[in-house]
């Protein structure tokens, strides 16, 4: 191969490796030569490109007439041209190209290059779309865009978007020319806080962010969420502050309305709960009062009838039953009155040194539970300063609670132990026990546990009084699982008191 041929082959190789299509055309704008890049551009070989009417078929119809006219005119007049248009592939997809040509020195046609600019076109379209969207966003958002100069001497607003007119009722030029500054328009209650945040950002260069109210010329108020950041050049030197003031008035109003609604709902829930408690209380009290009353009336009427003959022992049994039901009534009324008095802070314990073990043994022996159940008592001498009548009520209510919430065959244990500076009273049973979720709730007034499963569940104040009376003594009451199954109710009472501890305990009980 001669040197000329080698040089020609090398030149041809360089041309074919270019991403641009190198072309040559006659005076009618028909291609007479195209490089191999033509195949890569449209997916068709050189034979298709040099065919008659190639450009007439491949230039996009929307641009065909103007493009072909410009190319042919430039070739005919032997002047250069630089055009952008679209070429069609076989699948009718379009490629954006840039065609650069000049008159051919070897003939009457032209030569030049065609470059694929689709990516650049797409990037330009995307950039234009982003700019358009940004412009629309700026124009439609309830926000004011602004720039502010840096430094105290030249500080001031240099630009503010037109939205300030519709949002705040101020002309942009008036805002920029306001010598008093934007802080003068901030609500007096917010000004000190906002001014401090602004000064801190100016000093440190950290972003500024604040929510505040601003006055309008007609006396209204607009809530703004204002954020700005310091823009710097490539060397880190501060140029200006760029910020956005977002109108959040409606959101603020919505939050205020939501807060009001939450408050109203809480009040409504409290009233509803109070109403439920009242209805539950009335139903329970009605049941608990009617049951012993009905028994007393029935027994008394029977005793008073002339046509009923009964022995002396039967009459005494009727009298005992009347007395027992009367005591139940008295206990219910006393519990209600004591709970009310404790709530008002009218109860003060009368502390006297007492043998708690002996007191508990007597109460158990006299209780109905001892006549109905197997009750075991373990008590050794335990001396403490207590209000004996209130401790009696503690034990009576614990026993009554056990009788009410356990089956008849349930065994019961009562213990009194001294130690750790006080006395502990325990009433245990091997009944169904109490689920963990209810162990605190059972000591709340009018909480009767799962009353839907219990017949005669009671008013729901017995255990509440146990807790309150224990607290009056400076002690406490709680319930836990009994080893072997069942419930273990426990009350701890301190052995000795001082005036401060009694006062604190009284406050806790209230």
Image (cartoon, rainbow, N blue to C red):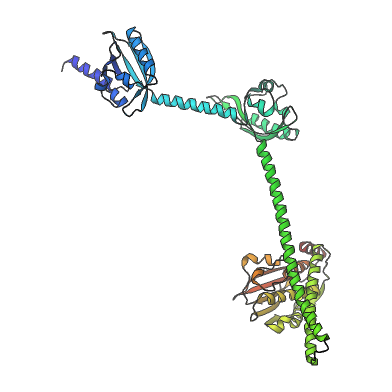
Q: Position of residue 142 (x, y in %)?
A: 62, 31
Quadrant (top left, top right, bottom left, bottom right) of the N terminus: top left
Does residue 348 appear to the left or right of 214 in the view shown?
Answer: right
Q: Position of residue 16 (x, y in %)?
A: 27, 22
| Nearer to the camera, 482 or 205 | 482
Does residue 485 appear to the left or right of 295 in the view shown?
Answer: left
Query: Image quarter for residue 83?
Result: top left
| Nearer to the camera, 357 or 100 | 100
- Is residue 327 visible in the rendered image? The answer is yes
Residue that sits furthest to the top in the current view: 77
| Nearer to the camera, 429 or 128 | 128
Residue found at x 80% / y 78%: 326
Q: Position of residue 8 (x, y in %)?
A: 22, 16
Seen in the picture, residue 71 relative to 385 is either above or below; the reply is above
Q: What is the total number of numbered labels drawn onto the structure image?
A: 0
Residue that sits furthest to the left in the current view: 1
- Is residue 445 visible in the rendered image? The answer is no
Query: Image quarter for residue 65?
Result: top left
Does residue 39 appear to the left or right of 203 in the view shown?
Answer: left
Query: Image quarter for residue 182?
Result: top right
Quadrant (top left, top right, bottom left, bottom right) of the C terminus: bottom right
| Nearer to the camera, 294 or 214 | 294
Q: Position of residue 120 (x, y in %)?
A: 41, 24
Residue that sits furthest to the front in the current view: 307
Seen in the picture, residue 76 relative to 46 is either above or below; the reply is above
């Amino acid at each position: 191969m001669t040197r000329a041929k080698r040089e020609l082959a090398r030149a041809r190789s360089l041309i074919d490796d270019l991403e641009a299509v190198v072309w040559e055309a006659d005076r009618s704008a028909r291609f007479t030569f195209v490089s191999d890049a033509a195949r890569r551009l449209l997916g068709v070989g050189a034979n298709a490109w040099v065919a008659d009417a190639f450009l007439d078929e491949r230039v996009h119809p929307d641009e065909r007439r103007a493009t072909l006219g410009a190319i042919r005119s430039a070739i005919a007049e032997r002047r250069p041209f630089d055009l952008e248009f679209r070429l069609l592939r076989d699948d009718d997809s379009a490629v954006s190209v840039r065609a650069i040509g000049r008159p051919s020195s070897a003939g009457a046609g032209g030569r030049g290059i065609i470059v694929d600019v689709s990516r650049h076109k797409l990037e330009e379209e995307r950039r234009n779309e982003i700019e358009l969207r940004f412009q629309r966003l700026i124009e439609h958002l309830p926000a004011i865009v602004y720039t502010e100069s840096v430094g105290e001497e030249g500080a001031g607003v240099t630009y503010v978007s037109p939205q300030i007119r519709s949002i705040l009722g101020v002309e942009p030029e008036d805002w920029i020319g306001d010598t008093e500054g934007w802080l003068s328009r901030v609500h007096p209650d917010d000004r000190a806080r906002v001014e401090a945040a602004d000064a801190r950002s100016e000093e440190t260069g950290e972003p500024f962010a604040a929510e505040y109210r601003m006055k309008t010329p007609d006396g209204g108020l607009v809530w703004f969420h204002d954020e700005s950041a310091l823009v710097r050049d490539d060397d880190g030197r501060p140029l200006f502050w760029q910020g956005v003031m977002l109108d959040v008035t409606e959101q603020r109003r919505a939050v205020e309305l939501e807060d009001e609604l939450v408050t109203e709902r809480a009040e409504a829930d409290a009233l509803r709960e109070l109403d439920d408690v009242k209805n539950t209380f009335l139903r329970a009290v009605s049941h608990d009062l009617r049951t012993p009353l009905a028994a007393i009336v029935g027994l008394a009427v029977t005793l008073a009838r002339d046509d009923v003959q009964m022995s002396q022992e039967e009459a005494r049994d009727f009298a005992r039953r009347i007395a027992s039901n009367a005591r139940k009534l008295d206990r219910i009324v006393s519990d209600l009155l004591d709970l009310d008095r404790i709530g008002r802070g009218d109860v003060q314990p009368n502390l006297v040194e007492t043998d708690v073990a002996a007191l508990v043994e007597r109460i158990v022996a006299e209780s109905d539970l001892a006549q109905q159940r197997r009750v075991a008592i373990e008590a050794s001498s335990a001396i403490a300063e207590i209000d004996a009548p209130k401790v009696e009520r503690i034990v009576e209510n614990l026993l009554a609670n056990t009788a009410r919430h356990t089956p008849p065959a349930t065994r019961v244990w009562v213990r009194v132990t001294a130690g750790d500076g006080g006395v502990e009273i325990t009433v245990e049973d091997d009944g169904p026990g109490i689920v963990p979720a209810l162990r605190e709730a059972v000591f709340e007034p009018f909480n009767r546990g799962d009353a839907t499963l219990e017949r005669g569940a009671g008013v729901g104040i017995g255990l509440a009084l146990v807790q309150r009376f224990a607290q009056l003594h400076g002690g406490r009451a709680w319930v836990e699982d009994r080893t072997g199954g069942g419930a273990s109710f426990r009350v701890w009472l301190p052995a000795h008191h001082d005036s401060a501890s009694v006062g604190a305990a009284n406050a806790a009980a209230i």
